[in-house]
Each structure stands twice: as C-alpha cells, then as structure tokens.
Image: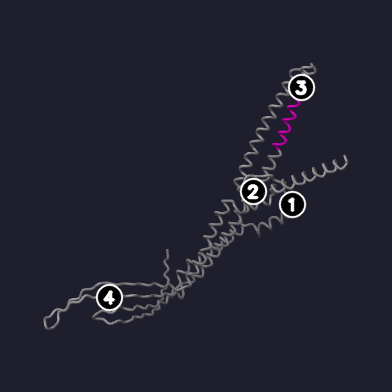
Amino acid sequence: MRSSSLTFVLTFSLAALVSLMTVASSFAEGLPDALAKAYQTNPQLNAERARQRGTDENVPQALAGYRPQIVASLGSGLQAVRNLLPDNTIQTATLRPWTIGVTVTQSLFNGFKTANSVRIAEFQVMSGREALRNVGQGVLLDAVTAYMNVLANKALYEAQRTNVQVLREIQATTKKRLDAGDVTPTDTAQAEARLNRGLADLNAAEVALGISKELYTQVIGEAPSVLTAASPVDRLAPVTQVASIDTANHEHPAILGAGYDVDVAQTSIKLAEGSLLPQCLGSGQRQPLGPDRFQPHHIRERPSLGIRSGQRTDL
C-alpha cells in the first residue's frame, strides 16, 4: 500500500514537472523569433520599405512617356451681334457659340529620353532595394546585439547576486568568529568592505541589465521574455579571409547599391545628351464648333507632324 502511494506521488510530481517545463518553453523566446519580430515591426525598417515603395512608382511614371497625351477642352460664350443692312435697317442677335476639342499628341522620337528615363528609374529601384537590404542587415545586427546583451547582462546579474549572497554569509561568519575571539576587527571590516563592493557591482549589473532590456524593446518592439541561448553561426561564415572578401564584393548590399548608383549616373548623362538630338512629335486635333444663327455646325480636324532639332551651346 505504501509502495503504491509512493509511486502515485512520483508519477504526479513527474507530470507536474513536465507541465511546468512545457509552460516555460511556451513562453521562451529564441533568437529566430526575436529576429522575425524585429524584421516585421522595426520602425526604421518599415520607413525604408515605405521609401522603397515610393521609388518603385518612378518606373510607371517613366513608362508613361511612351503613351500618347490627350488634352480635352470645352468652351462656351455669349456674343451680341448688331448688323447694319443696306436698307438702313439694323439686325441684332445674341449668339451662344460653343466649342469642344480633343487633341492627341504622340512622341515619335525624343532623343531616347524616354528609354533612358525608364532605365534610370529601374536602376534607382535596384539601388533602393539594396539600400533596403543594407538597412535590414543593420537592424538584424542590432537585434542580435540586443538579444545577446540581455543574455550576457542577465548572467552577470545572477553571478553578482550569488556573489552578494556568499559575501553576506562570509560577513555573518566573520562576526560570529569575532565574537568568539578567532579573528580581529580588521577581518570584520574587510568582510564588510567586500560586501559593499559586491553590492556596488550588483547595482551596476542591474543597471546594465535594465539598459539592455530597454534597447531590446527599442529594436525588437517587445520587452524580452525568457530568452534561450542561440546556436553558434561559425558554420555559416566563409572559411578564409579571401573567401569573405569575395563574398562581400558579390553580395554586400552597399557595394551592389553603389554599382547601381554608377549606372544611374551614366544613364543620366545619356539622358542629358538626348537634348542635342532632334525630336519628332505627331498630333491630331478634332474640334467640332457649335451652331449659331450665322454659322452652321461643322467639325474641324487638323493632323500635324512636328520636328524640332536640338540646340547645342558652347561654353
């Protein structure tokens, strides 16, 4: 009977321990979870994403240069007419003329300005994406730093707290030995000094832990919960220094973004040179005129083709 009761108690204790471990693990937060939160909620990264969305709109704006431009106009008025006829009679009338017109203009050749504008917009999008990646890397690095600082400062705080507990016991033991006459008052003063130094170190560790938690909240977006140790990343790093430099030259967003900025500058020169080339515009106009008492209703159509040459000014 006693053996069955002991077995029941051990089984119940084991089940309670497993349930507590499960609850603790559910509240635990790993480094991947913290990085995911920072990537989704960091305000600096979200602001850079919004800037990039604005940059993406430059491409459709540049592509609009290939499309025709349509201008519609509408006009109406009130006109008083007074005519003197050969028989010396006067004829008066009030006219209400109106006009409505549609003009379509299509650029046939503009010195490759539209094509170069599209290329510039596309290079700007590529450069902006690399800038976004660069900001993202900086944010994730700050997140990792904040995560590890919380773990390190928490471990330091626990170590200092344990040290203070040991120093308190040493001080109490020293006082008892002083009462017994085994030590001198100097030993007691030294024990108190070590305890005060330990309390100062504990206070400094507590302040450092509080600062690291606030920095964690600033970067991640939430206060730290139960953090777990992260796994090493040595397996992900290049083996040699030469391989690290080669990887950075081909994959670092700052370097790739600088290359796209060079493409933007070179294409901007071609865009400016396009002003020296001739331009050809085709346009068509359809304008019906409203009827009045003296002028019947009719429609006016005027197609046109214009060529304008570029001008060059020597400084």
Distance from the alpha carbon under mark 2 to that under mark 1:
18 Å
Q: CA distance from mark 2 to mark 4?
A: 72 Å
Tags 1 and 4 touching, CB below 8 Å: no
Which circle marks residue 234 in the picture? 1
- Which sits in the foreground, 19 or 265? 19
Residue 239: where, in percent of width, then height?
75, 54
Q: Which residue is mark 2?
A: 143
| Residue 174: image tag | 3
Q: Earlier in the sequence, mark 2 or mark 3?
A: 2
Please tell me in which quadrant of the rendered image residue 47 appears: bottom right
Q: Position of residue 256 (x, y in %)?
A: 61, 59
Separation of residues labelled 2 and 3 (CA atoms): 46 Å
Residue 37 vs residue 70: left or right? right
First of labels 3, 4 by sequence position: 4
Whether pointer 1 and pointer 3 mark residues with C-beta atoms closer than 8 Å, the reply is no
Q: Identify the mark at residue 97; answer none if there is no mark.
A: 4
Q: Nearer the viewer, residue 200 or 274?
A: 200
Question: Amino acid under label 3?
Answer: Thr
